[in-house]
Amino acid sequence: MTDLYDRHRAVMPEWLALYYQRPIELTHGEGRYVWGADGRKYLDFFGGILTTMTAHALPEVTKAVSEQAGRIIHSSTLYLDRPMVELAERVAALSGIPDARVFFTTSGTEANDAALLLATAHRRSNQILAMRNSYHGRSFSAVGITGNQSWSPTSLSPLQTLYVHGGVRSRGPYAELSDAEFTAACVADLRDMLGQARGGVAALIAEPIQGVGGFTSPPDGLYAAFREVLAEHGILWISDEVQTGWGRTGEHFWGWQAHARSGPPDMLTFAKGIGNGMSIGGVVARAEVMNCLDANSISTFGGSPVTMAAGLANLTYLLEHDLQGNARRVGGLLIERLRAICAQLPVVREVRGRGLMIGIELVEPGTDEPNQRAAAAVLEAAREGGLLIGKGGGHSTSVLRVAPPLSLTVAEAEEGAAILGQALRSA
């Protein structure tokens, strides 16, 4: 392992993050478990950053990949691609967007980049509204709309970004308000921001639950209230579903459905879980928006026959086995178990989340100050106990991120909660 770590440092960028003081090489997985190169078995509560959505080495997906690879691996979008069309049909039908069109990419970053291109071209404006504490990817344009300095290495951008309140419920100037008052204050802030913008703003992009930001979310209905204001100005709404999509929140198939009073978004972006580890991202948009480009375009690797076959098999498995329902049931049990464990721990400020998307915010005991030291210590202690979790949270990375595959069992939820409880008590 030391040899591989040394080789990694010799050829990879210094800014390429690695978890743990002694980084792990994962060699294989099965179900909700993975194994390290040292033979150690771990319960996986992070799923490759919410990407292994159903299970490791899911037979239905591996079979689909193998069979498609045996026929043809690649062709590009210059040729008709049956798996791509079939998956697009299913995604369009599930999206809730009328007269939907689907464009496949290879990542969530690229999906958001494509959505920004569509929005700015359709509206003929480079002004974008984004949420404070947000994260949308690592491309030049996606970094430019990321309201989280820990993940924004440059202030340069092809876009003019205006940040509005609302993505973080329990911190900030509106934290002490009721949900209704919070929503009203954020809507007032949005109106004030639009009063200062020059010309027509192109779009608002928002994660229904902020991922890297620490699994924070607004009250249900906030984006519906925003949508009413946006509609007055013709501004588009892009829902970034890269982490919230496909039923992970349990209550809804898409995160935007918690804000559905004013209808679906104009666009939604997706990635991560649909491929169960294969590189799939994409944009769903109303035809009027998707078809607004007046120049040729293709995708060399987006919509690859192999990744599309994986996505079809994975989506079929998810729907046939009601993994959204499982996320609701087992996720509800897990979050209550974690809240019970954390109730007596002064290092824990809040346990929040929905379904199998749970954040545990750590602070200096007796204060509201983020506790990065404790978060790093718990990450290490959980690993020593045989559990892999993630980390994030605004500018401070003091939130533990828990997001297992959606097929998690009750017994595995109890096992993971016990390990995490022990790690938290040692912080």
Image: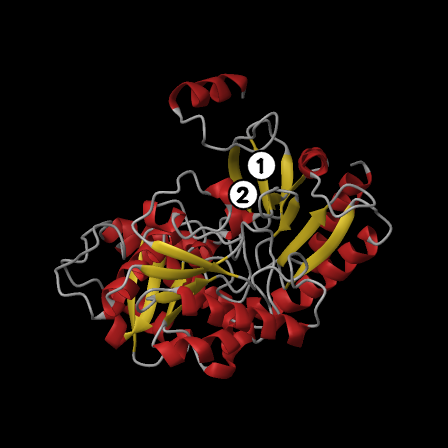
Q: Which residue is mark 2?
A: 29
The residue tagged with tag 2: helix, strand or loop?
strand
Q: Which residue is mark 1?
A: 35
The residue tagged with tag 1: helix, strand or loop?
strand
Crowding around mark 2 (Cα neighbors within 10 Å: few <14, some 14 to 19, many 20+) is some
Marked residue nearer the N-terminal end (2 or 1): 2
Is 234 in front, or is 284? Answer: 234
Say which residue appears at 45% left-offset and 32% top-offset: 16
- Give above or below for 420 relative to 26: below
Say which residue appears at 23% left-offset and 53% top-offset: 71
- Residue 181 placement (x, y as % from top left): 66, 74
C-alpha gap between disc 2 and disc 1: 6 Å
Q: How is the image coloured?
A: secondary structure
Does residue 83 appear anywhere in the picture?
A: no
Q: Quadrant of the N terminus?
A: top right
Does residue 47 appear anywhere in the picture?
A: yes
User: What's the amino acid at mark 1?
Assistant: Trp
User: What's the amino acid at mark 2?
Assistant: Gly
In the image: residue 231, left or right of residue 409: left
- Residue 189 placement (x, y as % from top left): 53, 68
In the image: residue 190, left or right of residue 284: right
In the image: residue 19, left or right of residue 353: left
